[in-house]
């Protein structure tokens, strides 16, 4: 059987189905070409062509070629590990965003010294320029091969493959179960670095064996690698877990449990500032505040559909008076029941209810990560009940409010995704198409560029996801707008229309910041703990040069407190340089230094946390300056 392939020069050719890409592309291959794409799928030269389409070429300049490089680097690393530690068993080793990893079953964790040895062995393998050759073999042959190699994890994977043939890749004496794609040979792996080792359960299940995951990264040039490693160092400097401890913002304690956050006074103060701003802005825009319980009868989650589609992320139920109760994973069913508490008229719609509601979701211990992945968190939740003719305008308003909030906190760049129907969902395809169409139309009418994220909607409806870009160029999922025709139907909520008949409202689920915990973690790293003045727990510190300056300093302190400036004193008998360094480490925006000159002139010498010295300034002028910054929510 033959298939039609359009070649990189635009010409067409009929080729035997299953022919390797390198045979079709042989007239186009140069040393700069490292891979190809068939339609939108990245392939290597060993890939059999089994469907019609258009072939295009990839060079080392194409960002997509990094997938080939990193997947190959993972195999080179696995080969090096097997040569140095023959008892290690292979699990899986994919290319991931910004790098690659490989999981190994070994008697102990790999040490930093081991990683150095593995890197050295990788260099030897790379120098050999070993071709990566693909073979498609019968399943029984693959089972025999990996049984002989004593690779139990590969055998488990093979037995779950439904096809009768499987693909393997060989490089020298090393062989791996893999579907590709890869570079033509190991010599093209130029700039690489092994980064860390972490424990990872086989298939992410705590009931399975603990494996050792080696992370690494690779680039086509040394310059790109060095730039990335410098970024990693900057990310470590900004790590919210380290800064959270140093700045006394929050902690996670074993006695409390993993994934559960203790907010310390400074962190709790910042949280209050965020919450107050959030509530005030919602009230200005026609939202009403609601408050709901932390638990409910488990039956509620059966009605909502969460038990059918979300049970693995819910905590085990508890029994109260012989009735099963559930820690809430979502706030939406409570808001629906408030809506349902009395008859509603079309004249009342839209109804906008918002809540900073704490929810609880079970996350496996291996994926918990500081504030970014937790088990208890507070969603900045809102639900809008509206008529169909109001839907587009309400989505517009949600988008506008989202952009306003993100920009106020200093995030000007973001990506927008339209997440469509997943494999498991409730409701009819017709309802889903209507919901997806409403979101798509709102985005297009707003003139916003977006990408489709297929299958990433929630079980009850599609959504718009907005990912913010931080100062290091990383994207974080925070904001979401979801259109839901399904849950209103499951709870049978209605309103009385102008025709005096019952009609079904549409429900919009909406979060701007996502969760306060995660958003706070992003803020810490975005600002490296040096929050804008309006969010800083301590906005200024009064520092005395000597004890004789304390009386004037105390008057300054009281004047600032009276002006609602968050200020603290440092009147200790320590050297001035020491006190300034400590204030800078605490990321305090302004240091107000008082010595003889300041007492004489009843003024302040002001030093910023960036090291800038401002001209001598009166107390009243400083108050005016800082108040303006706070009022404008200036991003420094």
Image (cartoon, grey):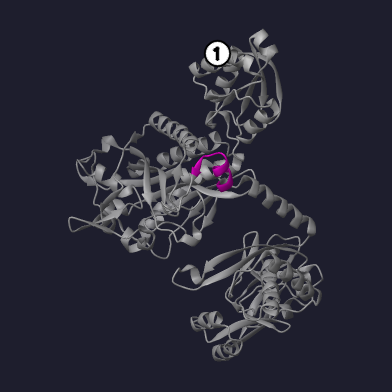
Image quarter in which the C terminus is found: top right
Q: Position of residue 596 (x, y in %)?
A: 69, 13
Q: Position of residue 499 (x, y in %)?
A: 22, 41
Q: Position of residue 317 (x, y in %)?
A: 29, 59
Residue 140 lies in magenta, yes or no? no
Q: Residue furthest left?
A: 321
Describe residue 191's horizontal placement relative to residue 153 as left or right. right
Against 86, residue 331 (above or below) is above
Against 497, residue 222 (above or below) is below
Describe the element under mark 1 as helix, strand or loop.
helix
Describe residue 34's horizontal placement relative to residue 156 as left or right. right
Residue 515 appears in view: no
Residue 447 appears in view: yes
The residue that label 1 is drawn on is: 555
Q: Quadrant of residue 393?
A: top left
Foreground: 460 or 583? 583
Give the residue at x 47% y 33%. Answer: 269
Give the residue at x 56% y 81%. Answer: 154
Foreground: 457 or 236? 236
Against 121, residue 595 (above or below) is above
Q: Quadrant of residue 612?
A: top right
Image quarter in which the N terminus is found: bottom right
Q: Position of residue 97 (x, y in %)?
A: 62, 60
Q: Which residues are magenta?
A: 241-250
Give the residue at x 64% y 74%. Answer: 180
| Most common SS among magenta residues | helix
Give the residue at x 55% y 66%. Answer: 199
Describe residue 19's horizontal placement relative to residue 292 as left or right. right
């Amino acid at each position: 059987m033959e298939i039609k392939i359009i070649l990189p020069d635009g010409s067409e050719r009929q080729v035997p189905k299953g022919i390797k890409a390198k045979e079709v592309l042989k007239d186009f291959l140069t040393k700069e070409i490292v891979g190809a794409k068939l339609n939108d799928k990245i392939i290597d030269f060993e890939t059999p062509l089994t469907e019609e389409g258009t072939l295009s070429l990839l060079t080392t300049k194409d960002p997509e070629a990094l997938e080939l490089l990193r997947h190959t680097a993972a195999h080179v690393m696995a080969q090096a590990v097997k040569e140095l530690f023959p008892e290690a068993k292979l699990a899986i080793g994919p290319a991931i965003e910004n790098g690659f990893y490989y999981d190994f079953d070994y008697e102990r964790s790999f040490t930093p010294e081991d990683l150095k040895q593995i890197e050295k062995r990788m260099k030897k393998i790379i120098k050999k320029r070993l071709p990566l050759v693909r073979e498609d073999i019968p399943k029984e042959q693959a089972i025999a091969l990996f049984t002989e190699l004593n690779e139990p994890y590969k055998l488990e994977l093979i037995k779950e493959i439904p096809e009768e043939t499987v693909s393997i890749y060989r490089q020298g004496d090393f062989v791996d179960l893999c579907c590709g794609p890869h570079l033509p040979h190991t010599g093209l792996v130029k700039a690489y670095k092994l980064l860390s080792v972490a424990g990872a359960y086989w298939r992410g299940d705590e009931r399975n064996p603990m494996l050792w995951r080696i992370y690494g990264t690779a680039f086509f040039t040394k310059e790109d690698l060095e730039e990335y490693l410098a970024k990693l160092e900057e990310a470590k400097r900004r790590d919210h877990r380290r800064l959270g401890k140093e700045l006394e913002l929050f902690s996670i304690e074993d006695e409390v449990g993993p994934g559960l956050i203790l907010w310390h006074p400074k962190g709790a103060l910042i949280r209050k500032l965020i919450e107050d701003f959030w509530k005030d802005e919602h009230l200005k825009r026609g939202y009403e505040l609601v408050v709901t319980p932390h638990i409910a009868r488990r039956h509620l989650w059966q009605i909502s559909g969460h038990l059918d589609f979300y049970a693995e992320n819910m905590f085990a139920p508890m029994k109260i008076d012989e009735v099963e109760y559930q820690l809430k994973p979502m706030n939406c069913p409570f808001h629906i029941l408030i809506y349902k508490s009395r008859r509603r008229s079309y004249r009342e719609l839209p109804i906008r209810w918002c809540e900073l509601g704490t929810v609880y979701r079970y996350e496996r211990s291996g994926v918990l990560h500081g504030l970014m992945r937790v088990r208890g968190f507070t969603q900045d939740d809102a639900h809008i009940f509206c008529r169909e003719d109001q839907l587009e305008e309400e989505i517009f308003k949600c988008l506008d409010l989202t952009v306003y909030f993100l920009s106020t906190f200093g995030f000007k760049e973001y990506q927008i995704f339209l997440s469509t129907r997943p494999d498991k969902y409730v409701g009819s395809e017709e309802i889903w198409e209507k919901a997806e169409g409403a979101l798509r139309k709102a985005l297009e009418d707003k003139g916003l560029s977006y990408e489709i994220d297929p299958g990433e909607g929630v079980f009850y409806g599609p959504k718009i996801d907005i990912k913010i870009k931080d100062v290091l160029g990383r994207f974080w999922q925070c904001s979401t707008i979801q259109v839901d025709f399904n849950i209103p139907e499951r709870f049978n909520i209605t309103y009385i229309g102008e025709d005096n008949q019952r009609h079904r409202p549409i429900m919009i689920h909406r979060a701007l910041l996502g969760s306060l915990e995660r958003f706070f973690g992003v803020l810490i790293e975005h600002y490296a703990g040096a929050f804008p003045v309006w969010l800083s727990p301590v906005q200024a510190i009064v520092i005395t040069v000597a004890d004789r300056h304390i009386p004037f300093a105390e008057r300054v302190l009281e004047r600032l407190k009276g002006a609602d400036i968050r200020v603290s004193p440092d009147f200790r008998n320590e050297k001035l340089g020491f006190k300034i360094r400590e204030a800078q480490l605490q990321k305090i925006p302004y240091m107000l230094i008082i010595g003889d000159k300041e007492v004489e002139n009843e003024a302040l010498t002001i030093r910023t946390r960036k090291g800038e010295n401002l001209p001598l300034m009166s107390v009243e002028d400083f108050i005016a300056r800082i108040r303006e910054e706070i009022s404008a929510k200036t991003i420094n």
